[in-house]
Amino acid sequence: MEFVIKLIAVAIGGASGAVVRYLINISPVANLFAKFPFPTFLINITGSFLIGFLLVLLTDKIDVNDNLRMAIIVGFLGALTTFSTFEMEIFGLVREREFTTAFVYMSLSVVVGFVGVVGGATLARRF
C-alpha cells in the first residue's frame, strides 16, 4: 500500500508540474525571443535550482514526509523540467539550420542549469 501512495504522490506532483510547464509555454513571455526557446530555458534553469535547493532542504534540513518530498522533487519538478523537450527544441533548431542558436541554447542550459543545482544546494545548506 505504501508503494501505491508514493505512486499517487508522484502522479499528482507530475500532473501539477506538467500543467505549470504548459501555462508557462503559452504565456506571453514565450514569444519574447524570436528563435531562442526561452520558456524551456527558464523552466530548466529555475527547476534545476529548485531541485538542488529542495533536495538538500527536504532531505537534510527539514523532516518532511517522504511522499511529499517525492511529489515535489520527482513528480512536480521532474515533470516541469523535462529534458526531452529541451532535446526536441535543439533538434528543431538544427533542422531549421539555426546552428549557432542551438549551440548557445544547449551550452547555456547545461552550464547554467548545473550552476543552478549547485546554487540551490549551497543556499539550502545555509538554512
Image: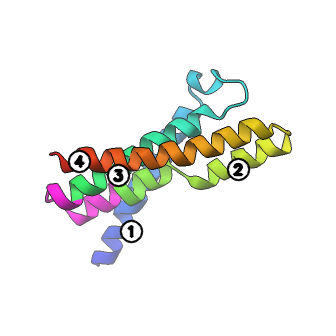
Labelled pair 4, 2 in contact (Cβ < 8 Å)? no
What is the three-letter code of the residue carrying label 4? Ala
Labelled pair 1, 4 in contact (Cβ < 8 Å)? no
Q: Main secondary structure of the magenta part?
A: helix
Q: Earlier in the sequence, mark 2 or mark 3?
A: 3
What is the three-letter code of the residue carrying label 2? Met
Q: Does the magenta portion include 28?
A: no
Tell me the number on the disc at residue 52: 3
Q: Which residue is at a point 13% across and 59% down the rendered structure image?
A: 63
Q: Which quadrant would residue 67 be assigned to in this image?
A: bottom left
Which SS class for mark 4?
helix
Q: What is the quadrant of the C terminus in the image?
A: top left
Q: Earlier in the sequence, mark 4 or mark 2?
A: 2
Q: Earlier in the sequence, mark 2 or mark 1?
A: 1
Residue mark closest to the camera, 1 vs 4: 4
Give the residue number, with chain letter if any, for mark 2. 88
Please report the bounds of the magenta region as a residue range.
59-72
Image coordinates for residue 49, horizontal then vertical, percent: 38, 44
What count of labels does the image hold?
A: 4
Which SS class for mark 3?
helix
| 121 horizontally vs 12: left or right | left
Q: Which quadrant would residue 60 be assigned to in this image?
A: bottom left
Give the residue number, with chain letter if any, for mark 1. 7
Residue mark closest to the camera, 4 vs 2: 4
Which SS class for mark 1?
helix
Q: Earlier in the sequence, mark 1 or mark 4?
A: 1
What is the three-letter code of the residue carrying label 1? Leu
What is the three-letter code of the residue carrying label 3? Gly
Q: Which residue is at a point 39% across and 61% down the rendered structure image?
A: 10
Which SS class for mark 2?
helix
Give the residue number, with chain letter if any, for mark 4. 124
Q: Does the magenta portion include 64?
A: yes
